[in-house]
Image (cartoon, grey):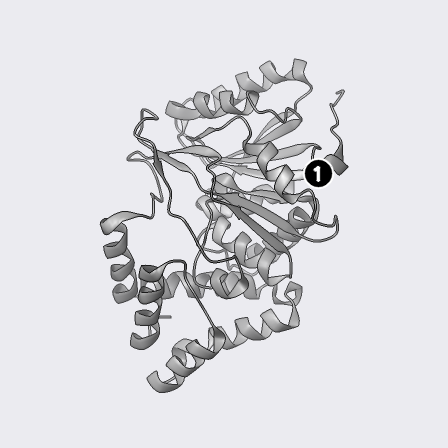
Amino acid sequence: MTRKTGDRQGGQGRVAILMGLYNGALHLADQLDSYVRQTSPDWDLIVSDDGSQDAGPDIINRFAQDQIGAGRAVRLVTGPARGVAVNFLSLLAHIPDDADWVAFSDQDDVWLPDRLARGQRALAAVPSGRPALFGSATWIVDEALSGHRMSPVFPQPPGFRNALVQSIAGGNTMLLNRAGAELARAAAAEALAAGAPPITHDWWLYQLVCGAGGQVIRSEDPTLLYRQHDGNLFGTNRGARAALQRLWQVGSGELAAWIACNAAALGASAHRLTPENRALLERFATLGTQDMVSRIRGFREMGLYRQGRAGQAALWLAAVVGRL
């Protein structure tokens, strides 16, 4: 197959799009059409179907035939049927050798035409051997793609001390450079082999790239329409309802369980972290076992933070009541 090749130095190059699919036929065509409209046209698509019982796989197969003339490879692989996070981690093993970039995609959003180009431009100045990740805000829309609302703004810079306790970008907005993709692929194999998959692949990617000394860039300009409907596994994180949900997560122990699961997944690749961040992860993992005074002191010394006052207040509450 003849492939179009962009100027890698100018931020172009070939993109491997990774999509997790599960009973997504209803909105799938909108997402696929938005790939075709990208201003960065040099991409391939790998879809991992996690056991769909609808027409989703057939839609992908027809789309694959349509893209042959454009020099794009579209592959459908069988997923592990162990949930969203494991499906995406397994997809990393299928990254083509000629991919300069790796983008992650949900099955029911609509990408804005410059979704890929924006990420490529943002990461173009990062040295080629340094892992880098781009993520962005989104337009939150209803099932009919109307009622646009901005996703929450995150005012503080990305960092490992934030990544340990919060994810700041949806996987559906993320783009990795080649070094970031290689890091993620190796770490995914380690987490899966250890039987310690993370809660979500996007949160884990943020932790991994930051922890390994890579660069994370978040844009507050939306790159896609994030469709909200009854089938969403995770919804938008804003408003009074979201604030109450955060408090419930602290009180119920759900936040602590998520953090522990993510820490275990990251621990499987601890040797890939910088010495400073590896020590921080080890200290963080023992925080919940300490008495309240030691826990609060340790929390303050580690400088852990969530974005926004409400998020930070919820984190302090978790530290006080021993739910970290």
Seen at 52% across and 61% down, the residue is 265
The total of numbered circles placed on residues is 1
Position above or below: 189 against 235: below
Instruction: Please indicate, yes or no, whether residue 98 appears anywhere in the rendered image.
Output: no
Residue 310 vertical placement versus 2 (above, below)? below
Q: Where is residue 43 in the image (x, y as percent from the top left)?
A: 64, 28
In the image: residue 109, left or right of residue 8:
left
> At which x and y percent is residue 168?
46, 52
Q: Where is residue 300 in the image (x, y as percent from the top left)?
A: 43, 77
Residue 129, given in percent of the width and then of the height, sits at 75, 52
Q: Nearer the viewer, residue 191 or 300?
A: 300
Q: Which residue corresponds to mark 1?
A: 100
Within the image, what quadrant is residue 101 found in? top right
- Using the image, determine if residue 56 lies above or below residue 90: above
Residue drawn at (38%, 42%), measured in percent from left and top?
Answer: 151
Q: Is residue 250 visible?
A: yes
* Left-right relation of 221 to 310: right
Quarter holding residue 12: top right
Left or right, residue 4 beside residue 217: right
- Viewer-proximal residue among 219 and 27: 219
Q: Residue 233 versus residue 168: which sits nearer the camera?
A: 168
Check disc 1 and report its element: helix, strand or loop.
loop
Q: Residue at 39% x, 30% y: name it.
A: 23
**Quarter holding the N terminus?**
top right
Point out the image quarter for the C terminus: bottom left
Instruction: Count neighbours of disc 1 (C-alpha within 10 A) and say few if under 14, some if 14 to 19, many if 20 or more.
Output: many
Using residue 290 as the reference point, say whether residue 42 is left or right of it. right
Residue type highlighted by circle 1: Asp
